[in-house]
Image (cartoon, rainbow, N blue to C red):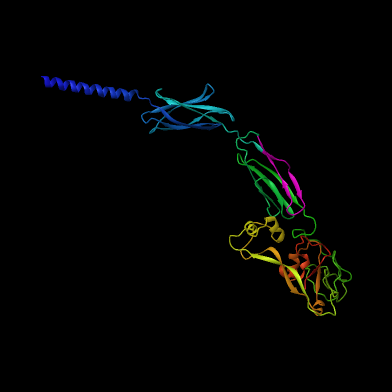
Amino acid sequence: MKKITNRMISFAFLMCMGLFLFSLRVNAANNVTTINASGDTQGATISGTTDDDVVAVLIEVLDGTDVVTLETHAVTTGAYTATLSCALVEGKTYSAYVVNYDGSGEPKTTTFSIPISVTGVAMNQTTGTLTTVGQTLQLTATVAPANATNPAVTWSSSNPSVATVDTTGKVTAVANGTATITVTTEDGNKTATATITVAISGTGDSGSTGGSGGTGNSGGTGDGGSTGGSGSTGNTGDNSNTGSNSTTGTQGNTNASTDNKNSSSDSAVKEVKVNVPIEYIVVKGDTLGRIARRNQMTLSELLTLNPQIKNPNLIRPGQRIIIGYTKKTVASETAEENTNIVYYIVKRGDSLYKIARMNKLSFTQLIALNPEVMGRRYIYPGQKIRVK
């Protein structure tokens, strides 16, 4: 009998302990442990974690003390995410409140603000003119409204071979022509534009080609050119000598002349120093920017040395690019050779590259014949360029 009583006491003790532990489990606090919130004018997204044994949470969005919206959201393995549809106002700050649906445990709160969207962008000027290579113009952008959350912008040029623009809106002239500079907002892709005209004075490689001479009456004097000498060979490619009244036997190039002034009784060979271009041959993967940096110069300086490059973004492997000049001692011609020197008279629209091609010379060969033009940016109508 005593043994049975002891067993009953032990069983009763175990039952009491089980009930006590069960009551602790039932009454344990079910806390919301984390909360994250963000939103826009269409609503808010609330997420976080809570205790695993909670089946739902109550989520509220508050404007001060007023409830904008609330939602009961089921919890899966302790995590919750809810997207609440409601009208929220840009620039305002709201509170998010999350608590276990049964009210147990500690609630979590946080705040979030609605971003202010960009509505437009404007430039400080819509047109501009640059007159020299390398000249700059600073454009600035004003984003509206002034308190937009993300006022960042990007800049671009429609024609980088005419004018480039950097990340701050600074425009740099490259060659004659027109380019449209566009500023674009990161938020909303709002845009504004400015038309930039590059008008470099003088004769440059990007200048327009001047008119060819009309029908000559006595050898066909071309526009701005001198009358060609009898029988001299020229390669201007124009038709200024095709007039029906041209003097027979004098169809010389209207822009070429034979100069015998250099003939001298002194036939001794003399040595002179001339500027010779240093060329770089483009390889796969090269860009003008890399070539410029490698040779310790700016892109504008490299383009000035290579006016034949119309688009800085288009170069090809094997292309020859001038990266500088060096002095070289060469022998001058004898008196006999000097009697055969031929000059080309520059006309409007000409360039050194064009003159070289017309006379079947490379640019390097033309420069070697005319060392005095090295370092000059322009040639001018009426100037004499040696081509033989």
Q: Residue 180 in the image: x percent, y percent? A: 70, 48
The image quadrant where one finds the N terminus is top left
Choose between 34 and 66: the one closer to the eye. Answer: 34
Q: Is residue 314 left or right of residue 75?
A: right
As drawn, which residue projects farthest toward the right? 218
Is residue 137 located in the magenta-colored stretch of the structure?
Answer: yes
Q: Is residue 147 left or right of residue 63?
A: right
Q: Residue 295 in the image: x percent, y percent? A: 65, 60
Is residue 123 located in the magenta-colored stretch of the structure?
Answer: yes
Which segment did they paint magenta? 121-144
**Residue 138, relative to residue 286: is it above or below?**
above
**Residue 150, relative to residue 374: is it above or below?**
above
Q: Residue 280 in the image: x percent, y percent? A: 65, 64
Q: Does residue 234 appear anywhere in the picture?
A: yes
Choose between 209 and 145: the one closer to the eye. Answer: 145
The image quadrant where one finds the C terminus is bottom right
